[in-house]
């Protein structure tokens, strides 16, 4: 294992990768886009959101969709002065909030569920959502087959309020399953969570898969591997359709104009494409380059012949 990759693993605490017996090879934002899990526009949008320390929730009913892999890549987009706070388990200990305020703190939850003791649930998860609603950043994953299912779970089991849920800012809905031709894993919907003028949660859909989502996989979260379907119905070749009006709402939440957000998304997407063209595709390389955005590295780096493409976890 090279030094850069070893340093990457050291950014995350023990148990971050969940039940895996062997550490999965991480992937960068550049590699995730190249693998087809999401398009460049959505990845650039996530970068714009995380760069402002806003929340993201990545959800999939089935395992191995790529949630933790993507969240780990997004950590590299946090501002340098950010203090990452890794939560684990059910026990609630928020004494750290006396020293770390929402202007620096970003909560990281590798999974919000009761599946393993190291995962975040109960009082700890409830308080994490409340802190997100109070202005702390939150990056997390969970198991759910739709936004409605996720919201119902967080409301009913964790008693999350509308302001708490709006603290997630962007919600991604993945679908993952096996087919005779290979593994299918994609973001099929992206939502912006926010409250309206009355304080009620009023989600807007940023993007949806052309032609509709994959079949429901409710119940697959308890399986050790994704279920097998006869095919993906051509969805792996379909585009995400983005809604400009929804992006304008997101821009208002982020405190900028709609046109300014569109320019920023285009610039960040071009930056990631520029890294790929220069052969800077590994997680450590992309994180290091992103710290100097919008300035791309001056010269191309030689390809790393020892690096192999990772598998989404």
Image (cartoon, rainbow, N blue to C red):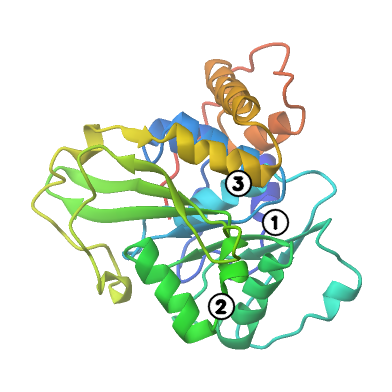
Q: Is residue 86 shown to the viewer in this render? A: yes
N-terminal of the pair, mark 1 or mark 2, is 1
x then y, percent, for residue 240: 34, 36
Side of 301 relative to 180 (left or right): right
Rounded to the nearest angstrom, the CA distance separating label 1 from label 3 is 16 Å
* Nearer-the-camera pick, 310 or 265: 265
SS type, badge 3: helix
Q: Can residue 308 be seen in this view?
A: no
Q: Nearer the viewer, mark 2 or mark 3?
A: 2
Q: Place residue 83 in its image quadrant.
A: bottom right
- Residue 284, x across and y down, in percent: 66, 38
Q: Which one is closest to the eye, mark 1 or mark 2?
A: 2
Q: Name the residue under label 1.
A: 10
| Label whose residue precedes the other's in the sequence (2 or 3) | 3
For the image shown, how many numbered marks are present on the structure? 3
**Outermost residue toward the front in this view:** 198
Instruction: Nearest to the eye among marks 1 and 3: give it.
Output: 3
Q: Is residue 176 placed above or below 298 in the rendered structure? A: below
Can you name the residue that lies furthest to the right here?
A: 99
Distance from disc 2 to disc 3, alpha carbons, whole Å, reads 25 Å
Marks 1 and 2, how far apart at CA: 32 Å
Residue at 51% x, 49% y is 70
Q: Do the residues labelled 1 and 2 touch (CB within 8 Å)?
A: no
Residue shown at 53% from the left, 47% from the top: 26
Residue at the image point whose x is 24% and y is 49% from the top:
213
On screen, residue 263 above or below 21:
above
Provide the residue designation for mark 3.
74
Q: Name the residue under label 2.
A: 160
Residue 275 occupies which quadrant of the picture?
top right
At label 2, counting other C-alpha atoms closer than 10 Å, the crowd grade (few under 14, some 14-19, many 20 or more) is: many
Q: What element carries label 1?
A: loop
Tell me the crowding category of disc 1: few under 14, some 14 to 19, or many 20 or more residues within 10 angstroms, Cα based.
Answer: few
């Amino acid at each position: 294992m090279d030094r850069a990759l070893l340093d990457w693993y050291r950014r995350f605490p023990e148990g971050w990768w969940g039940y895996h017996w062997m550490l999965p090879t991480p992937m960068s934002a550049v590699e995730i886009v190249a693998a087809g899990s999401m398009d460049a526009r959505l990845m650039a949008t996530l970068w714009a959101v995380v760069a402002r320390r806003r929340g993201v929730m990545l959800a999939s009913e089935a395992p191995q969709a790529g949630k933790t892999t993507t969240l780990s890549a997004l950590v590299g987009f946090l501002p340098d002065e950010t203090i990452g706070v890794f939560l684990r388990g059910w026990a609630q200990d928020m004494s750290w909030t006396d020293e770390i305020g929402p202007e620096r703190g970003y909560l990281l939850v590798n999974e919000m569920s009761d599946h393993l003791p190291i995962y975040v649930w109960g009082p700890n998860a409830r308080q994490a959502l409340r802190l997100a609603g109070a202005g702390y950043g939150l990056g997390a994953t969970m198991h759910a087959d739709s936004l409605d299912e996720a919201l119902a779970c967080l409301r009913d089991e964790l008693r999350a309020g509308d302001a708490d849920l709006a603290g997630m800012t962007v919600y991604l809905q993945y679908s993952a399953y096996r087919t005779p031709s290979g593994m299918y894993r994609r973001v099929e919907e992206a939502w912006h969570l926010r409250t309206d003028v009355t304080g009620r949660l009023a989600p807007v859909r940023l993007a949806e898969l052309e032609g509709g989502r994959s079949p429901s996989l409710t119940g697959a979260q308890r399986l050790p591997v994704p279920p097998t379907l006869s095919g993906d119905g051509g969805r792996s070749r379909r585009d995400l359709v983005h809604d400009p009006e929804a992006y304008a709402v997101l821009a208002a939440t982020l405190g900028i104009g709609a046109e300014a957000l569109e320019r920023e998304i285009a610039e960040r997407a071009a930056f990631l494409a520029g890294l790929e063209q220069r052969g800077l595709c590994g997680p450590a390389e992309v994180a290091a380059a992103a710290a100097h955005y919008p300035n791309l590295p001056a010269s191309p780096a030689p390809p790393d012949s020892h690096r192999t493409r990772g598998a989404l976890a």
